[in-house]
Image (spheres, grey):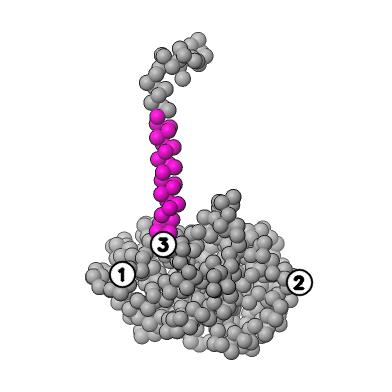
Amino acid sequence: MVSWRCPQRGASRGGRPARGLRASLAYPEAVIGRRRLLQGTALLGAGAGLYAWLRFERLMAPSALGALGESGAGRSAGAQALVEELMASLDGAPLLDVHAHLAGRGAGSGCWTNPRLDDPSSPVDMVRGRAFRAAGMPDPDAPDEAWIDHLGALAAALPFPSRHHVLAFDYRHTPDGQRDLERSEFHVPDAWAQEAAARWPSRLAAGASVHPQRPGALEALDALAAKGVRVVKWLPSAMGIDPASEAYLPFYERLAELGLWLLVHTGEERAVGDASEADWNHPLRLRVPLEAGARVLVGHCAAGGAYPDPDRADRRRTPAVELFLRLLEEFAGSGRVAGEISTVCNINHFGQALEPLLDRPDLHRHLLNGSDWPLPAVGPLVLLGPLARSGFLDEERVPALRELFDESPLLFDAALKRQVRHPRSGARFTDDLWQSVAWQGA
């Protein structure tokens, strides 16, 4: 067993300003003009802020569902060429998406959101909560089923088969197994993911989320596997889980017995969770479940952030994606580890993650596609201009990709990841990724 020890980480007169009536009489136009400019600027700023807040859902999720019935109709030759190139890479296999999220308000679904995400006295949390829900469910008054049907309709409109694993999200739990509502961000029951799969059986598959300190966790895994679930999701820093804890060995051993994949977020996480526990997202902490025989999906290929390197005497901070690649090299022969590439093209990740990943085509057979839905619908996270200027994307393909985004953010997400290239060698993700070799071999 690999041991783990990783530390946290105006006018003037005689040199004096003129005051009172004399100043206003001496320079009335300058004073009035300046005040009007400031007032006008303040009004414009307030108006822009109010407009943005009222139009928040549209700004955060600009791809609507209105044209889905005509998906592909009127598509430009350039956009069609990108779709056909992606389909050729799939070679008849369905597009696999191992990482898509659900959320809701709770009516009829059992979903729960921490009240601080709707509290005006916590404006940062409130914006985070509204942004996340807006991307997946543009109508702020829609029932929770609308999130499922939004994703299901987008998937059904794709010009090829697809399979999207929609994930539950467990509460944070205390060491004695109690729900920690104060420090939980949101909750999506396993049963709601199963409801999503029942509503769209040809496109959506149920994923789960089981906290290892939840009472009856091992029995929950048994029941989920019996229902055909293949993925169990953890976000360590949000759920209060240290993957390197040997207390979870029975959980890992049961995962191994059942053949379930443990999808673990790795790398920095700023949207959800406790920043003070960010080191629990360290990719090398996953050595423990892998040594225990579990199958592990490394979320985002550790696309962002840096961590102390436990294999170096000086524990120098090393980019998380490099630590992920080391993990992949160590355990690739087991057939029980894969990296999941959602968000690697996002504005906050591509500069650190894309080049190292594209530089290792020998490891692409150990990578799988994930969308991290609804993030592909959040336009500000996926900016094509910086990708093109950095050499990761042909400038001439930008208009066609933008057209696909307007048609369907799901289609855009896959097409973009098919098009990104190494800025010097021109290497792209190999077809092994798109044909889900790692998934088929499990």
Give x and y (percent) for residue 32. Answer: 40, 24
Q: Amino acid at mark 2?
A: Asp
- Badge 3 density bin: few <14, some 14–19, many ≥20, Cα 10 Å: many
Look at the magenta stretch and give its main secondary structure.
Answer: helix
Above or below, comparing residue 410 to residue 387 in the picture:
below
User: Start and end of the magenta stretch?
Assistant: 36-59
Q: Amino acid at mark 1?
A: Ala
Which numbered disc flags the more N-terminal residue, 2 or 1? 1
Q: Which mark is residue 442?
A: none
Q: Residue at x 54, y 55 (%)?
A: 126
Q: Is residue 73 left or right of residue 53?
A: left
Q: Residue at x 46, y 20 (%)?
A: 10
Residue 340 seen from this side: no
User: Alpha carbon of mark 2 to alpha carbon of mark 1: how far?
Assistant: 50 Å
Depth check, mark 2 against mark 1: the one in front is 1
The residue indicated by pointer 2 is: 176
The residue indicated by pointer 3 is: 61
